[in-house]
């Protein structure tokens, strides 16, 4: 926000420039990247449309999750003789670290 300008003035200025702003309600936002998910809980989302392009501004509490591939589960199961369900639990408990999961299951 520009100093000395109240929110109503800012909204009018944005409308004059052809910029539309809208709040979007959501319980969470999930961004999927290769190998992980970024989860934003209780997000505050603003959609901004300008010159036909939509942009999103997101604020909230962030947490990440590692995605565990089927190949990793199979490898841990083969290395330890454990079931795939147990291998997946071990991988989830180790944050996706294959070596740590194998060591946990071999104990």
Image: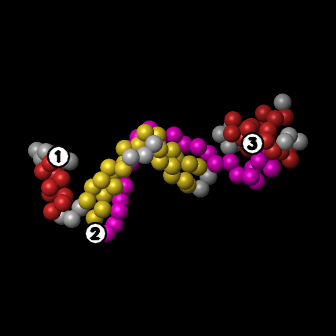
Callout 3 secondary element: helix
- In this rendering, position of residue 11 left or right of residue 94: left
Answer with mark 2 or mark 3, whichever residue precedes in sequence: 2
Q: Is residue 47 left or right of residue 70?
A: left
Instruction: Determine which residue is flagged by label 2.
Output: 51
**Cα–Cα gap, marks 2 and 3:** 47 Å
| Quadrant location, the C terminus | top right
Q: Give the range drawn in magenta.
A: 52-76
Could you tell me which residue is drawn at 75 percent across and 42 percent down? 88
Give me the disc on residue 88.
3
Image coordinates of residue 25 in percent, x first then y, are 38, 46
In this rendering, would 35 be left or right of 105?
Answer: left
Q: What element carries label 2?
A: loop
Residue pictured at 85% horizontal, 40% vertical: 82
Q: Earlier in the sequence, mark 2 or mark 1?
A: 1
Picture disc at residue 7 = 1
- Outermost residue on the top side: it is 107
Query: Would residue 99 be seen by someone viewing this image from the given angle?
Result: no
Pointers 2 and 3 in contact (C-beta within 8 Å): no
x, y percent for residue 49: 30, 62
Looking at the image, the residue that sits furthest to the left is 4
Within the magenta stretch, is there residue 92?
A: no
Q: Does the magenta run of residues contain 71?
A: yes
Residue at 59% across, 56% down: 34
């Amino acid at each position: 926000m520009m100093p000395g300008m109240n929110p109503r003035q800012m909204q009018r200025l944005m409308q004059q420039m052809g910029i539309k702003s809208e709040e979007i309600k959501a319980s969470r936002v999930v961004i999927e990247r290769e190998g992980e998910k970024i989860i934003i809980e209780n997000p505050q989302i603003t959609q901004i449309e300008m010159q036909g392009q939509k942009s999103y501004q997101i604020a909230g509490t962030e947490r990440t999750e590692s995605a565990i591939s089927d190949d990793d589960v199979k490898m841990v199961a083969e290395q330890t003789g454990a079931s795939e369900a147990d291998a997946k639990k071990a991988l989830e408990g180790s944050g996706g670290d294959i070596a740590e999961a194998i060591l946990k299951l071999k104990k």
